[in-house]
Image (cartoon, helix red, strand yellow):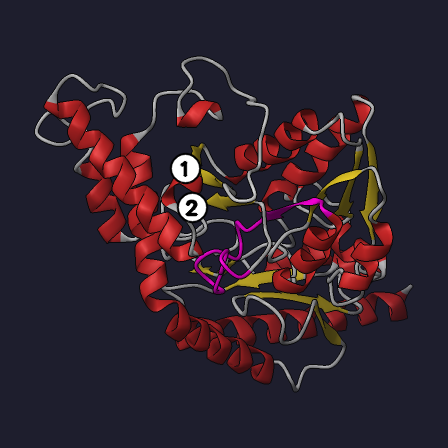
Amino acid sequence: MQLPVYLDYAATTPVDPRVAARMAECLTLDGHFGNPASRSHIFGWQAEEIVETARRDVADLLRCDPREIVWTSGATEANNLAIKGAAQFYADKGRHIVTSCIEHKAVLDSCKFLETQGFELTYLKPGTDGLVTPAQLLEAIRPDTILVSLMHVNNEIGSAHDLEALGAVTRAKGVLFHVDAAQGAGKLPIDLQLWNVDLLSLSAHKVYGPKGAGALYVRREPRVNLVAQIHGGGHERGMRSGTLATHQIAGMGLAFKLASEHISEEKQRLIGLRERLLEALSDLDGWQLHGHATQNAPGIINLGFADVDGESLLLSLRGLAMSSGSACMSATLEPSYVLRGIGVADELAQSALRLSLGRYTAEADVDAAATAIKNSVSQLRLAGSARLQNA
């Protein structure tokens, strides 16, 4: 059976073979299988060295201190720890939090939970480009604001916030700034020496690492404190208890190291593939690009097609593995809340496709996608027109 062309890298990336090999070295008796917390023998020492090497590799990608990296099971846990942990620790200073209406559900649901605990939330509405401006953020911050949470790169439309400008606002106001960088890390440069970001969530499986691994950056200077959300053993400096998954962490560390080595050229390659796709679609009428045209992670492309039923379009493109939005929301046929949040009409939002390109996407894949989309859209429009004429 011929597999579809994979164009869903924003949902997950395949594990790089080099990463898989590194992980396998940490699983069996002839490898480094020990518990990193076992300090009395060589098996534990070897595992701890692997964990700390990976911590340095992740920190190097972000330009931060390795001691500021806290291992988690993924970006969802990191978001929960950052938002709930900061809110609970600093509740005596204030109970107001600012976020946007198009954040990932891991952020939005954490915020909604805090609303049940007496915190007040402001949900900013971004512009049609999917971005919150520094002026918007400044206006939303109040004397009792303790935390701002805005994503680096939107997982559905690819728009990328100017974190340096937004961080300047939060630092000037003395407010903590949390960033969900699951979709940005390894794709766009991150500089935590330059940016005033206090907490930053990461995921391994968006960067050609394993699922089930992630991390939270927690700034040491000025110091950020959190209330732990998982208790039992005091691992990770008391912020996240649990035996560390050495193989997962080893994989994440190498994945981030590989990404840092090729980030500039890979970005340019993806820009070229993106332009190739959009140019190939230019002779098709009645579609629009959602999100910012240039301030983005170029591998994420969200397109809306007029006069086409979205479910029928997706079903007709079975030769392409892609999505109509976030993988976390793929079970619902409702229009994307992200597209609604940036003002896209329901009809166009319902027919949207998210194509996401990555390390193993070739020009032939992009060409095949463009041809299939043009054929399917044209055929569905003809069928729809015929039904109207016969009605």
Are circles 2 and 1 on residues that touch, CB within 8 Å? Answer: yes
Q: Residue at x 72, y 38 (%)?
A: 108
Q: Nearer the viewer, residue 236 or 169?
A: 169
Q: Nearer the viewer, residue 44 or 182?
A: 44
Q: Residue at x 47, y 64 (%)?
A: 189
Q: Main secondary structure of the magenta part?
A: loop
| Residue found farthest to the left | 30
User: What residue span does the magenta drawing correspond to?
Assistant: 174-194
Residue 65 lies, in percent from the top left, at 40, 47
Residue 213 is labelled as: 1
The mark that comes first in sequence, 2 or 1, is 2
Which residue type carries mark 2? His
Give the vertical position of 188 relative to 42 (above or below).
below
Q: Mark 2 sits on what residue?
A: 205
Q: Callout 1: 10 Å neighbours few (<14), some, many (20+)?
A: many
In the image, residue 311 above or below residue 88: below
* Residue 12 x %, y %: 46, 49
Q: Residue at x 16, y 31 (%)?
A: 46
Q: Extreme right residue here?
A: 391
User: Alpha carbon of mark 2 to alpha carbon of mark 1: how far?
Assistant: 7 Å
Q: Position of residue 118 (x, y in %)?
A: 83, 23
Q: Residues within 10 Å of mark 2 (few under 14, many from 20)?
A: many
Q: Nearer the viewer, mark 2 or mark 1?
A: 1
Is 25 covered by the magenta stretch? no
Quadrant in the picture for residue 125: bottom right
